[in-house]
Amino acid sequence: RELSAAALAHNVSVLRGALPPGCELMAVVKADAYGHGMAAVVPQLLSLGVRSFAAATLDEGSQLRALGAEGTVLILGCTSPQRAGELARLGLTQTVADLAHAEALNAQGVPLRVHLKIDTGMHRLGLDAGNHDAIGQIFALPRLRVTGLFTHLCADTGTAPAQRVFTQAQADTFWTAVRLV
Protein backbone atom coordinates (compact mmCIF):
# COMPACT_ATOMS: atom_id res chain seq x y z
CA ARG A 1 0.00 0.00 0.00
CA GLU A 2 1.07 3.52 -0.69
CA LEU A 3 0.77 6.26 1.91
CA SER A 4 0.52 9.87 0.78
CA ALA A 5 2.06 12.19 3.36
CA ALA A 6 0.35 15.15 1.68
CA ALA A 7 -3.09 13.47 1.84
CA LEU A 8 -2.56 12.55 5.48
CA ALA A 9 -1.53 16.13 6.34
CA HIS A 10 -4.56 17.46 4.44
CA ASN A 11 -6.93 15.11 6.29
CA VAL A 12 -5.48 16.07 9.68
CA SER A 13 -5.88 19.76 8.80
CA VAL A 14 -9.49 19.34 7.65
CA LEU A 15 -10.44 17.33 10.75
CA ARG A 16 -8.77 19.81 13.10
CA GLY A 17 -10.62 22.62 11.34
CA ALA A 18 -13.92 20.88 12.07
CA LEU A 19 -13.24 20.57 15.81
CA PRO A 20 -14.63 23.07 18.28
CA PRO A 21 -12.19 24.97 20.50
CA GLY A 22 -10.69 22.86 23.27
CA CYS A 23 -11.07 19.57 21.40
CA GLU A 24 -8.19 17.42 20.27
CA LEU A 25 -7.94 15.07 17.30
CA MET A 26 -7.59 11.37 18.17
CA ALA A 27 -6.26 9.25 15.29
CA VAL A 28 -7.72 5.74 15.14
CA VAL A 29 -4.95 3.47 13.91
CA LYS A 30 -6.36 0.03 14.73
CA ALA A 31 -5.71 -2.98 12.49
CA ASP A 32 -2.17 -1.80 11.68
CA ALA A 33 -3.46 1.64 10.71
CA TYR A 34 -6.15 0.02 8.57
CA GLY A 35 -3.53 -1.88 6.62
CA HIS A 36 -1.27 1.11 5.89
CA GLY A 37 1.23 0.09 8.56
CA MET A 38 1.36 1.65 12.00
CA ALA A 39 5.13 2.09 11.69
CA ALA A 40 4.59 4.27 8.60
CA VAL A 41 1.51 6.22 9.70
CA VAL A 42 2.16 7.01 13.38
CA PRO A 43 5.47 8.89 12.95
CA GLN A 44 3.84 11.06 10.28
CA LEU A 45 0.87 11.78 12.55
CA LEU A 46 3.24 12.63 15.40
CA SER A 47 5.12 15.03 13.12
CA LEU A 48 1.78 16.71 12.36
CA GLY A 49 1.22 17.26 16.08
CA VAL A 50 -1.29 14.46 16.68
CA ARG A 51 -0.90 13.33 20.29
CA SER A 52 -3.92 11.10 20.91
CA PHE A 53 -4.45 7.71 19.34
CA ALA A 54 -6.94 4.85 19.50
CA ALA A 55 -6.11 1.20 18.90
CA ALA A 56 -8.09 -2.03 19.05
CA THR A 57 -5.94 -3.98 21.52
CA LEU A 58 -3.48 -3.58 24.35
CA ASP A 59 -0.78 -5.02 22.08
CA GLU A 60 -1.48 -2.31 19.49
CA GLY A 61 -1.35 0.25 22.30
CA SER A 62 2.06 -1.08 23.32
CA GLN A 63 3.21 -0.73 19.72
CA LEU A 64 2.01 2.89 19.70
CA ARG A 65 4.08 3.62 22.80
CA ALA A 66 7.11 1.99 21.14
CA LEU A 67 6.58 4.27 18.12
CA GLY A 68 6.72 7.35 20.34
CA ALA A 69 3.06 8.07 21.13
CA GLU A 70 3.24 9.79 24.51
CA GLY A 71 -0.29 11.24 24.78
CA THR A 72 -3.58 9.46 25.32
CA VAL A 73 -3.76 5.99 23.80
CA LEU A 74 -7.29 4.60 24.00
CA ILE A 75 -7.83 0.85 23.72
CA LEU A 76 -11.17 0.37 21.97
CA GLY A 77 -11.45 -3.40 22.45
CA CYS A 78 -12.04 -5.34 25.63
CA THR A 79 -8.83 -6.05 27.54
CA SER A 80 -8.74 -8.94 29.97
CA PRO A 81 -8.74 -7.68 33.56
CA GLN A 82 -5.68 -9.88 34.16
CA ARG A 83 -3.75 -7.48 31.92
CA ALA A 84 -4.69 -4.39 33.96
CA GLY A 85 -1.10 -4.09 35.19
CA GLU A 86 0.12 -3.76 31.61
CA LEU A 87 -2.49 -1.09 30.89
CA ALA A 88 -1.28 0.85 33.94
CA ARG A 89 2.43 0.37 33.21
CA LEU A 90 2.02 1.64 29.64
CA GLY A 91 -0.30 4.47 30.68
CA LEU A 92 -3.05 3.30 28.33
CA THR A 93 -6.71 4.27 28.64
CA GLN A 94 -9.13 1.34 28.52
CA THR A 95 -12.63 1.43 27.03
CA VAL A 96 -15.30 0.14 29.41
CA ALA A 97 -18.54 -0.98 27.81
CA ASP A 98 -20.28 -2.61 30.78
CA LEU A 99 -20.35 -2.58 34.57
CA ALA A 100 -19.00 -6.12 34.97
CA HIS A 101 -15.84 -5.29 32.99
CA ALA A 102 -15.36 -2.10 35.01
CA GLU A 103 -15.72 -3.98 38.29
CA ALA A 104 -13.29 -6.68 37.14
CA LEU A 105 -10.70 -4.06 36.12
CA ASN A 106 -11.16 -2.24 39.43
CA ALA A 107 -10.65 -5.50 41.35
CA GLN A 108 -7.14 -5.84 39.93
CA GLY A 109 -5.93 -3.22 42.40
CA VAL A 110 -4.17 -0.86 39.99
CA PRO A 111 -5.28 2.67 39.08
CA LEU A 112 -6.51 2.90 35.51
CA ARG A 113 -7.84 5.60 33.21
CA VAL A 114 -10.97 4.55 31.34
CA HIS A 115 -13.37 5.93 28.77
CA LEU A 116 -16.99 4.79 28.88
CA LYS A 117 -18.57 3.56 25.66
CA ILE A 118 -22.19 4.71 25.79
CA ASP A 119 -24.77 2.89 23.63
CA THR A 120 -27.13 5.47 22.17
CA GLY A 121 -28.99 3.28 19.73
CA MET A 122 -26.63 1.06 17.77
CA HIS A 123 -27.22 -1.76 20.29
CA ARG A 124 -23.94 -3.50 19.58
CA LEU A 125 -21.67 -2.50 22.43
CA GLY A 126 -21.73 -0.11 25.35
CA LEU A 127 -23.48 0.95 28.50
CA ASP A 128 -27.13 1.77 27.92
CA ALA A 129 -27.32 5.57 27.91
CA GLY A 130 -30.44 5.35 30.09
CA ASN A 131 -28.79 3.18 32.74
CA HIS A 132 -27.61 6.06 34.88
CA ASP A 133 -27.21 3.76 37.88
CA ALA A 134 -24.57 1.59 36.15
CA ILE A 135 -22.78 4.64 34.76
CA GLY A 136 -22.73 6.21 38.22
CA GLN A 137 -21.43 2.98 39.77
CA ILE A 138 -18.48 3.00 37.37
CA PHE A 139 -17.66 6.60 38.26
CA ALA A 140 -17.64 5.54 41.93
CA LEU A 141 -15.12 2.68 41.49
CA PRO A 142 -12.03 3.73 43.47
CA ARG A 143 -9.31 2.56 41.08
CA LEU A 144 -10.92 3.69 37.83
CA ARG A 145 -10.68 7.29 36.71
CA VAL A 146 -13.20 8.07 33.99
CA THR A 147 -11.45 10.50 31.64
CA GLY A 148 -13.90 10.37 28.75
CA LEU A 149 -17.18 9.13 27.34
CA PHE A 150 -17.99 8.34 23.73
CA THR A 151 -20.63 6.79 21.51
CA HIS A 152 -20.85 5.40 17.98
CA LEU A 153 -22.98 7.45 15.61
CA CYS A 154 -23.76 4.62 13.21
CA ALA A 155 -25.70 6.62 10.59
CA ASP A 156 -23.82 9.93 10.78
CA THR A 157 -22.55 9.80 7.20
CA GLY A 158 -26.02 9.41 5.75
CA THR A 159 -27.88 12.25 4.12
CA ALA A 160 -31.36 10.72 4.07
CA PRO A 161 -33.78 12.51 6.42
CA ALA A 162 -34.32 9.34 8.52
CA GLN A 163 -30.56 8.96 9.01
CA ARG A 164 -30.19 12.59 10.08
CA VAL A 165 -33.10 12.23 12.53
CA PHE A 166 -31.60 9.01 13.96
CA THR A 167 -28.16 10.60 14.35
CA GLN A 168 -29.64 13.65 16.08
CA ALA A 169 -31.58 11.36 18.44
CA GLN A 170 -28.34 9.50 19.24
CA ALA A 171 -26.54 12.79 19.94
CA ASP A 172 -29.39 14.02 22.16
CA THR A 173 -29.38 10.72 24.09
CA PHE A 174 -25.60 10.92 24.54
CA TRP A 175 -25.64 14.50 25.83
CA THR A 176 -28.47 13.68 28.22
CA ALA A 177 -26.37 10.84 29.68
CA VAL A 178 -23.31 13.09 29.91
CA ARG A 179 -25.22 15.80 31.77
CA LEU A 180 -26.46 13.27 34.32
CA VAL A 181 -23.03 11.94 35.34
Image (tube, rainbow, N blue to C red):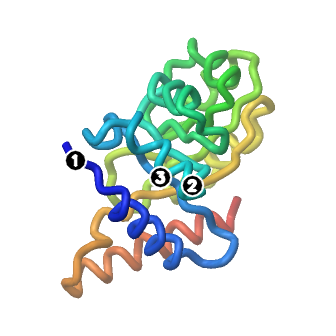
Q: CA distance from mark 1 to mark 3?
A: 18 Å
Q: CA distance from mark 1 to mark 2?
A: 21 Å
Left or right, residue 147 beside residue 115 = right
Instruction: Tell me the residue that label 3 is attached to.
Output: 27
Secondary structure beneath dot 1 equals loop
Q: Residue furthest right?
A: 142
Quarter of the rendering containing residue 35: top left
Of labels 1 and 3, earlier in sequence is 1
Left or right, residue 2 beside residue 180 = left
Instruction: Tell me the residue that label 2 is attached to.
Output: 50
Quarter of the rendering containing residue 120: bottom left
Q: Identify which residue is drawn at 52% across, 46% down.
A: 53
Q: Quadrant of the C terminus?
A: bottom right
Asked if labels 2 and 1 touch by Cβ distance under 8 angstroms, the answer is no
Q: Identify which residue is drawn at 46% across, 58% down.
A: 151
Asked if labels 3 and 2 touch by Cβ distance under 8 angstroms, the answer is yes
Q: CA distance from mark 2 to mark 3?
A: 7 Å
Q: Position of residue 18 (x, y in %)?
A: 49, 78
Left or right, residue 87 beside residue 159 = right
Instruction: Tell me the residue that label 1 is attached to.
Output: 2
Q: Position of residue 114 (x, y in %)?
A: 64, 40
Q: Amino acid at mark 3?
A: Ala
Q: Position of residue 147 (x, y in %)?
A: 69, 48
Q: Position of residue 7 (x, y in %)?
A: 33, 64
Q: Identify which residue is drawn at 44% across, 54% down.
A: 119
Asked if labels 3 and 1 touch by Cβ distance under 8 angstroms, the answer is no
Secondary structure beneath dot 2 equals loop
